[in-house]
Image (cartoon, rainbow, N blue to C red):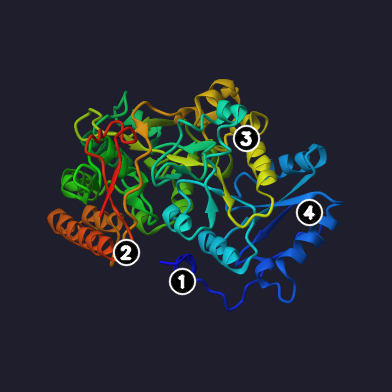
Amino acid sequence: MKKKGFVSVILAGVMVASLTGCGSSGTTATTQTAGSEAAQNSGETKAEKAEETKKDSGGQTVITVWTPERHDSAYVESKVEEFNANNDKGIKIELNVITDDYPNMMALAFSSGTAPDVAVIGGATSGFDLKTFVEAGIIDPLNDYITDPEYEKVTEASRLQFEGINMIGGNVYWIPTGMRSGTRLEYNKELVEKAGCTEFPDTLDGVVELADKITKDGNGIYYGVGFTQAVPFNRWLEGVAETSGIYRYDYKTGTFNFDGYKPVIETAHKFFENDSVFPGSPTQGVDAMRAQFVEGTFGIWGNASQEAGVFTSQFPIDKFEWGVAEVPTLDGTRKGAQTIQPQKGYMLFSSSKNKDKAWEVIKYFSSEEFLKGYLEAGLYLPISGYMDSVIDKSKTGRLADFELKDYESVYPAVPAISLEGDDYGTVIWRAIMGDVSADEAIADLNKRYNNALENDIKLGKVKRIVIKDFDPLHPNQGTIEYTE
C-alpha cells in the first residue's frame, strides 16, 4: 500500500467540516481542539509560512512541538520559556496542546504539509498505532540520535525499547522519559480496619470477602467497592489476570486466547452477587466515583499512579487515611507481569525541515535538568534507573506508593486487528456483571479476535507476532518473530 493510502486510513472518520484553532499571538503554548490553524491556511505555502515564522522569532529557528497532555502544562510551559530565553542554539520552541483526536490531527497535519517537528507520545495515547504511522512515513527513526552519551545516561534508551510500542524491527521511534504504573488498589484504612482486616488481601477471593464485610458494616451507608463505566475491567481487574499469568494473546502460538479469564470473571462476579458494589457506580464516570471514594461511601477503588495526584490535589482526601495495595492474584502468587505504560516520549516528524534542531529540543525535554523537576512534581514516575536515583522522592508525595514493582513490565504490542463488535474489556465486564456467562463471553472473544487476526493477516494489514521463548514474568525479553 502506498504511503498516501495509509494516511487516508488514519484520517478516516475525522470531522473536517469545520477546522478551528487558536493562534499563539506571541506565546509559546496554544491549545487546539479540532485541528491545526496551519492546516486551514490557504494561499500561503509551508515554506513561506516557515520563513515568516522565523522572521517573527528574531531569526531563530522555530521548532513546533505538539502534545496531548494538559496535566503537566504549567511545568512544561515554564521550562519552554526558560529554554527560549537562555538557549544558545538559535532555537525557539513553540508548544501546542492538541486536546481532541490527537492521532488523526497529526495525520491530517502531515497530509496537509503543516505537521509539527516533534510530537509527544506515550504507550497509553488513545488511538495511536505506531505501525500505521511508520508505514505511512509520518515519523523518522531516532537510531542515529539516541546513542548520544548524555542522552543514553539519563534515559537509558538502549534498554527502553519495546517492540510495537516504540520500536519496530530494530528502528526506534521514541524513548519514554516517564511511566504510569500498573494498577493498584486504593482503600479507606478506617473502613478496612473496622472490617477486621489488618493486612490487605493478596487474593481476589480475599478482596471479595473484604468488600462483603465492609458492605455489611456499612448497612446501606457505605459499600465495599466502587467501579466506573470507563473501562471498568481494564482499570484493575485486568491486572489481577496478568499477575495470575493470564493474558489475552498467546505469544507462543501467535493467537488470541481468552480461556484463562474464566476464574477471574467468576470470582469478580461475586462483588455483584454479594451487593458489595456501590449502587449505580458502573454507570458513573471516573471523576464522579473518585469524588464518592473521597466522601467515604465505599472502601476499595482501583487505578494506577495518576491517583497519587488526583487524591492529593484534584480530589484531596482529608476525611480518612488512605492506603495503596498491590493488586491481588487468584492464588496469592505472581505468575505473570503486570502492564506498565511507558510515557512522555517524543517523535520526530519526517517532514521536519530542521531535524537536527528538533533533536536538540527532544534532548532538552529528555535531559536531567528538565526531568528532575518534572518527576519530583509527581507528573509521572521515573522509568530510567538513573532518574530514579537522582530525584528527591520526598518531593513526590503519594506517588512513592506506586513505585515500580519487579513484576511490572511492558508487553510487546499485540497485532492491531480490525475487530468487529465489542472489545474484550467490554465483553468480560458484561460477564462479570452477569449479563452473559463466562463461557459465552470467552467463546465469543476467541472466535471474533482470531477471525479478525487471520483476516487481517491475509489482507496484509498485520503480521502474527510469535515469541517461542515467551516468559510471562519477563514479557519483553523473548525473541520476537513476525510471521504471515
Camera-side residue: 397 or 404? 404
Q: Assess disc 1: are there few (<14), some (14-19) or many (≥20) residues with their C-alpha within 10 Å of its C-alpha.
A: few
Q: Distance between the residues labelled 1 and 2?
A: 14 Å
**Which residue is at a point 58% across and 63% down the rendered structure image?**
110
Q: Assess disc 4: are there few (<14), some (14-19) or many (≥20) residues with their C-alpha within 10 Å of its C-alpha.
A: few
Q: Name the quarter where the C terminus is drawn.
A: bottom left
From the image, tell me which residue sits under label 2. Answer: 418
Q: Which of marks 4 and 1 is nearer the N terminus?
A: 1
Camera-side residue: 218 or 25? 25
Above or below, 234 against 110 in this view is above
Q: How far apart are marks 3 and 1 (CA)?
A: 36 Å
Q: Element under label 4?
A: loop
* Residue ranking furthest to the left: 439
From the image, tell me which residue sits under label 4. Answer: 27
**Residue 184 found in image quarter:** top left
Three-letter residue code for mark 1? Ala
Q: Earlier in the sequence, mark 1 or mark 2?
A: 1
From the image, tell me which residue sits under label 1. Answer: 12
**Residue 326 found in image quarter:** top left
Q: Name the quarter where the N terminus is drawn.
A: bottom left
Camera-side residue: 69 or 437? 69
**Residue 452 found in image quarter:** bottom left
Q: Residue 374 carries which label?
A: 3
| Drawn side of residue 389 relative to residue 191, left or right | right
Q: Which of marks 2 and 3 is nearer the N terminus?
A: 3
Q: Which of marks 3 and 1 is nearer the N terminus?
A: 1
Q: Element under label 1?
A: loop
